[in-house]
């Protein structure tokens, strides 16, 4: 078979044309890639610039455009999720982090990060059961510790104290930091719930666990004494509270009323009151004065109560003591039927009473939340033991 000469020339020509076409396609692809990369770079820089200028809405639009151009940018997805959450767009943040956590082609540490962020999203949205499930998926890596911290916070919000104890115990191992005080409070919460349910045995068991966590824990001792009162054992209650009276008298006002009632059940009410009076030298401006004054006035009359208040004003002068002093003088004026003195003391008493009713009394050392009563856990920041037991006389913002 004979092959024409022009066919032999056509073969290298076709090969050359194919090579030229392939090179042209590669150059077109490279050009498109360059254009796409340039577009991504412009969008990224524009988004960062808008963020720096506090234009969050436009910044999110720019960054979403980048994420659509390159779905593999996990860090950008995390940044977008955080931005959505900060702006209150929790549903969009959840979608971003769910997309990441469901992907199998990303690194395990990125998937753990996504589960942690998703748990925070659910926590922000109030979906606590789903938040717990997501946070429990983070079992190792750098986000294990913050996930456990978030779980502990969530359990406290839910008032699931038993799970809070488990989370705090796990955090002790991870952080090498003591959570004994918090654990003791969790057991105290369990004891109070059991007391309200009239399950005294469960309450006593919880208090023993609290005291095992922290020996002589003040709140646990207070509740233990209250349980003794419920079981009609005032002698045991007084013995338990005796530790507070001798060693941590700053907290004595929390049990002062119960202390006097326990002594009253034994027919020794005046003896119980006399044991509290010496502590007024350091606590003349606190709630201990309120309790002692009320009972001293009832048991000894206004003349003796006035003598007591005069001594308090010498030792620890305060607006609270002065208010009670004018109140006592007003009672004496009424007893003596002295209209002039009654009018004067009433005006002074009512003015000071109005002033002291606006006192802040207690201020959180962590967040500054002000309250008129003592809290073991701050209502503002949820921290434990951040209120000083000593009452202040600053103006209240509440």
Image (spheres, rainbow, N blue to C red):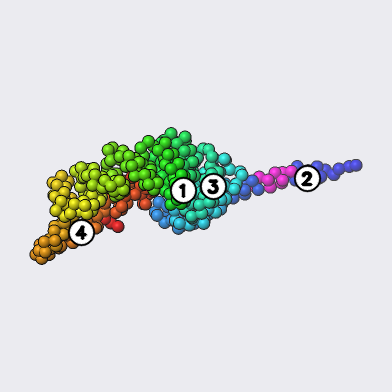
Q: Is residue 3 left or right of residue 66?
A: right
- Specify which label sits upstream in the sequence, 4 or 3: 3
Alpha-carbon span between mark 2 and mark 1: 100 Å
State the mark number for residue 353. Answer: 4
Residue holding disc 2: 10
Alpha-carbon span between mark 4 and mark 2: 112 Å
Residue occupying the point 60% across, 46% down: 103
Q: Nearer the viewer, mark 4 or mark 1?
A: 1
SS at badge 3 = helix
Say which quadrant the N terminus sits in: top right
Quarter of the image for residue 56 reads bottom left
Q: How many other residues sit within 10 Å of disc 3, few (<14), some (14-19) or many (≥20)?
A: many
Mark yes or no: residue 348 visible.
no
- Specify which label sits upstream in the sequence, 3 or 2: 2
Q: Are marks 1 and 3 in contact (CB under 8 Å)?
A: no
Q: Are marks 4 and 2 in contact (CB under 8 Å)?
A: no
| Residue 58 percent across, percent down from the top left | 45, 57
| Residue 71 percent across, percent down from the top left | 57, 49
Residue occupying the point 55% across, 43% down: 137
Alpha-carbon span between mark 4 and mark 3: 53 Å
- Specify which label sits upstream in the sequence, 4 or 1: 1
162 or 270: nearer the viewer: 270
Residue holding disc 1: 199
Tag count: 4
Q: Is residue 18 magenta?
A: yes
- Specify which label sits upstream in the sequence, 2 or 1: 2
Residue holding disc 3: 134
Q: Nearer the viewer, mark 2 or mark 1?
A: 1
């Amino acid at each position: 078979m004979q092959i024409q000469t022009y066919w032999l020339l056509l073969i290298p020509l076709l090969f050359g044309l194919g090579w030229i076409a392939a090179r042209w396609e590669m150059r077109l692809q490279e050009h498109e890639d360059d254009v796409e990369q340039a577009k991504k770079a412009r969008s990224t820089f524009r988004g960062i610039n808008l963020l720096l200028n506090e234009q969050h809405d436009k910044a999110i639009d720019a960054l979403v455009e980048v994420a659509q151009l390159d779905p593999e940018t996990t860090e950008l997805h995390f940044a977008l999720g955080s931005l959505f959450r900060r702006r209150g767009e929790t549903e969009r943040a959840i979608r971003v982090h769910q997309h990441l956590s469901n992907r199998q082609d990303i690194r395990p540490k990125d998937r753990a990060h996504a589960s942690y962020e998703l748990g925070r999203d659910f926590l922000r949205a109030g979906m606590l059961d789903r938040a717990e499930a997501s946070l429990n998926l983070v079992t190792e890596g750098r986000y294990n510790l913050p996930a456990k911290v978030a779980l502990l916070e969530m359990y406290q919000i839910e008032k699931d104290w038993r799970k809070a104890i488990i989370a705090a115990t796990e955090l002790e191992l991870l952080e090498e930091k003591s959570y004994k005080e918090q654990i003791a409070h969790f057991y105290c919460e369990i004891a109070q719930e059991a007391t309200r349910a009239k399950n005294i045995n469960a309450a006593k068991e919880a208090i023993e666990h609290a005291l095992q966590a922290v020996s002589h824990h003040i709140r646990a001792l207070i509740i233990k004494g209250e349980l003794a009162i419920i079981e009609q054992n005032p002698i045991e209650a007084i013995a338990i509270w005796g530790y507070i009276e001798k060693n941590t008298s700053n907290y004595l006002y929390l049990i002062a009323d119960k202390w006097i009632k326990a002594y009253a059940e034994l027919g020794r009410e005046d003896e119980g009151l006399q044991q509290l009076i010496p502590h007024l030298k350091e606590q003349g401006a606190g709630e201990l004065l309120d309790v002692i004054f009320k009972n001293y006035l009832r048991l000894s009359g206004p003349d003796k109560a006035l003598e007591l208040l005069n001594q308090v004003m010498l030792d620890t002068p305060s607006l609270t003591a002065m208010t009670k002093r004018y109140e006592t003088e007003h009672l004496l004026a009424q007893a003596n039927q002295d209209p002039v003195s009654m009018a004067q003391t009433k005006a002074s008493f009512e003015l000071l009473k109005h002033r002291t009713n606006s006192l802040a009394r207690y201020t959180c050392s962590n967040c500054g939340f002000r309250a008129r009563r003592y809290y073991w856990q701050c209502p503002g920041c949820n921290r434990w033991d951040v209120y000083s037991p000593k009452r202040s006389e600053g103006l209240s913002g509440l």
